[in-house]
Image (cartoon, rainbow, N blue to C red):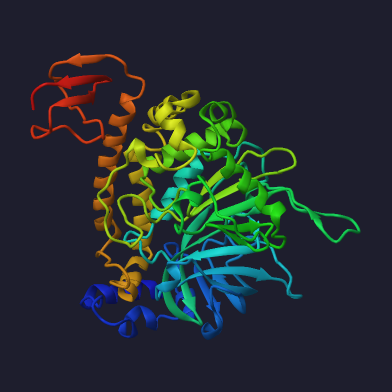
Amino acid sequence: MRISFRAVLMLIAVVLPSVAACSTDDTMAETVTFRQMQEGMDGNSLPLVNLTVGLDSVSRERFVHGEIEIADYHGRLDGAKNYVKFSCLIRYRGRTAAGFEKKAFGVKLLDENGGDLDADLFGIRKENSWVLDALAIDRCKMRNRVCFDLWNELSRTPYDTNYEGRNGTRGLFVEVFINGTYQGLYCFSDKIDRKLLGLKKARPDDGQGGVTIRGVLYKGVNWNDHDDIYLLSYKDAPTDGTAWNSYELKYPEDYPSEATWQPLKRLIDFCSYKTGDDDFGSGWQDWFYRQNLVDYFVFTLALNVGDNAYKNTYLSVRDIGADHRFLITPWDMDQSFGSHWSGRYDETTALLSKYDGVAPFNRLIPNNIGGFRDEAARLWRHTRGTVFAPAHIFSLMEAYARQLVASGTWQRERERWDGNPVPLKESPQEELEYVKAWYQRNYDALSAQFEAVGIADVTVGRPSTATYTLDGRPATTTSRPGLRIGQGRKWVSKTK
């Protein structure tokens, strides 16, 4: 009977004591090579990715040449293959992530002439540019992936695209090797880019040496100035580069100019207090897609996504010559499901006032302009039994957890990276107990807050079932007397 190499590793891991306290130079995981794992793949194995590159030359700032090999037991590679190998360009990804020992990578596939090569990998889409997310600060290693899965269920682009209106990434978990040596668990995914969002390409001006800018794509990249990242104001700054205030030009990055930055400047001008309340109320839907804005508001509250708005967020216009409405697309959602961006736990639950200082929500929510707050409440009531139902979300998480355990990946990741930079529990299911408890609290708190929206009648007395305070916290015997929410009504509690 043939025993797979993966099975041998799992058996050794059970017999030997945990090596989580050892240095990364001493772990068994690091002794596993790409070829050994490839030869021992079975139906439980995650896909394997090996990057061959001179690590001393890799940086965030520039791509370097290398090779990428991918092995997939289930034959989902570029024409139903089990193995592919490409020349490629490789760089580190992320700002905060670049400071961790376990690096994230960006990879661009190349053809034999050094040009872009599109390949259909894992049925995600035919593309040349891919992301290997290191998941470094996420204790359960799935927050960002689960967030995108849910966002893709909830929201679509308000126009047709070649990818069924998808407004988020698709991806799957893989095990990565660097120059044949084990590196750990990663998420392999596509990017948010012009092609995915269906943005119109810049059009060359025949004989003029310039271009006509059509689609534009910006990404919020820092919190240096809250007013500009929140679309409230901006400082005068050069427009001849790919960075401007707190934003980065992602498309067309080859043509930074006043013309490419002008749409974002005009958006901020409108959202700022230069625009009076009456003009804002009558004009905001000329600048945003209403449903996309409602989706983003409810989604980020439901999961309490904390490092976005609009850092780690993409803002795009499909064709500035035809329409100046902006589409919002989230990114990098590790700070969610009760986690801080540093990797520590964060027990905080979401409040409807979350975006009081962020345009355009700073006016839409408090003033219920155009019934926006009511529409957000309706969306929550509709989706809390479907997309955001605890049972549904927990099912997604458990499926990923079983995959990580059955493949042996969780044990290898723990041996390789426990405590660097965050501690890892013995199983993903153990870590998910915290996540599930947090989500149920946030779900209950958010339901209570949205129940209050549009409720006018106030009942005096003591309700027979659970009620919540106005900030969404369960009312207890120690809560102050005052207004409560429950049973679809508002209550005035005169006693504790």
Q: Number of labelled discs?
A: 0
In this view, the residue in front, 324 or 173, is 324
Instruction: Tell me where residue 195 appears, x and y as whole percent.
Output: 67, 52
Quadrant placement of the N terminus:
bottom left
Residue ID at (30%, 31%):
449
Instruction: Tell me where residue 95 appears, x and y as whole percent.
Output: 47, 67
Residue ID at (58%, 38%):
270
Whether 33 is drawn above or below 342: the answer is: below
Whether 66 is drawn above or below 97: the answer is: below
Can residue 3 be seen here?
no
Instruction: Tell me where residue 166 appears, x and y as whole percent.
Output: 58, 44
Residue ID at (88%, 58%):
208
Instruction: Tell me where residue 115 appears, x and y as whole percent.
Output: 74, 70
Can residue 31 be seen here?
yes
* Image quadrant where residue 77 sits: bottom right
Quadrant placement of the C terminus:
top left
* Image quadrant where residue 425 sits: bottom left
Whether 316 is drawn above or below 189: the answer is: above
Whether 306 is drawn above or below 78: the answer is: above
Residue ID at (44%, 54%):
145
Left or right? Give the position of 18 relative to 29: left
In this view, the residue in front, 276 or 191, is 276
In this view, the residue in front, 246 or 349, is 246
Left or right? Give the position of 50 relative to 125: left
